[in-house]
Amino acid sequence: MATFNIKTEATKPLYAGVGVTDLAVERVRDYVTVAQKRVTSIELEPKALRAQAKARRTAMEKRVSELQSDAKTLPTKVQAFVDENLSTVGDAYGDLINRGESLVTRIRKQESTKATVSSAKTTSAKAKTTKTQAAKATKSTAKKATTTAKKKSAAPKSSAKATTTSATKTATSATQAVVDATQKVGD
């Protein structure tokens, strides 16, 4: 009997979505390349344009005639196509899951992502320390209002500065991780 792993099953749609996006970016890049090649090969001479238009009209008339005859057999062809490709849909979904999972794994393994995670943990720890020190300073000030009010507590300020510095480093790491990740999409 097969076991059901909820974490694995829950991530499949996410990975499939990432895979679809990656595939779409790849296709768009291919289409842009083809379009650029076609634009450079456009003929701009009037005689050549007329000849091309006449040839295209003849080809279109022929194609319309073919399409009319094909239209009669279309329902049968569509049913055969659906029957034939039903299992392909499941395979394609599985392929997209694998593609998305592969991309997410590559992004997670890149150095900039690891640096961002590490930096974020440090920032979180420093923020907790700052919060704790500020709470203690506030309680101490409240208890000894007359004597402590004249003295300033340096611990929360220095801790807050360290937290701010750490957060800035985390943001820089995260920016680099995003740049590195975008270069992997569509490959």
Image: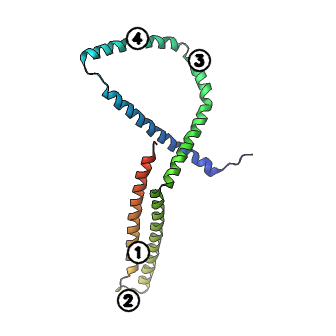
Quick one: label 4, few (<14), some, or many (20+) residues within 10 Å? Answer: few
What kind of residue is marked 2? Thr
Q: Real-space Cα distance between discs 2 and 4?
A: 98 Å
- Residue 33 at x, y = what percent? 38, 34
Q: Real-space Cα distance between discs 1 and 4?
A: 78 Å
In the image: residue 135, left or right of residue 40: right
- Seen at 53% across and 45% down, the residue is 100
In the foreground, 106 or 9: 106
- Seen at 32% across and 15% down, the residue is 53
Q: Nearer the viewer, mark 2 or mark 4?
A: 4
Q: Nearer the viewer, mark 1 or mark 4?
A: 4
In the foreground, 120 or 33: 33
Label drawn at residue 61: 4
Quick one: label 2, few (<14), some, or many (20+) residues within 10 Å? Answer: few
The answer to which of marks 2 and 4 sits earlier in the sequence is 4
Residue receiving disc 1? 159
Give the color scheme: rainbow, by chain, secondary structure or one colour.
Answer: rainbow
Residue lying furthest bottom in this view? Answer: 147
Quick one: label 1, few (<14), some, or many (20+) residues within 10 Å? Answer: many
The answer to which of marks 1 and 2 sits earlier in the sequence is 2
What kind of residue is marked 4? Glu
Asked whether the viewer can see residue 14, the reply is no
Residue receiving disc 3? 76
Label 3 sits on a secondary structure element that is helix
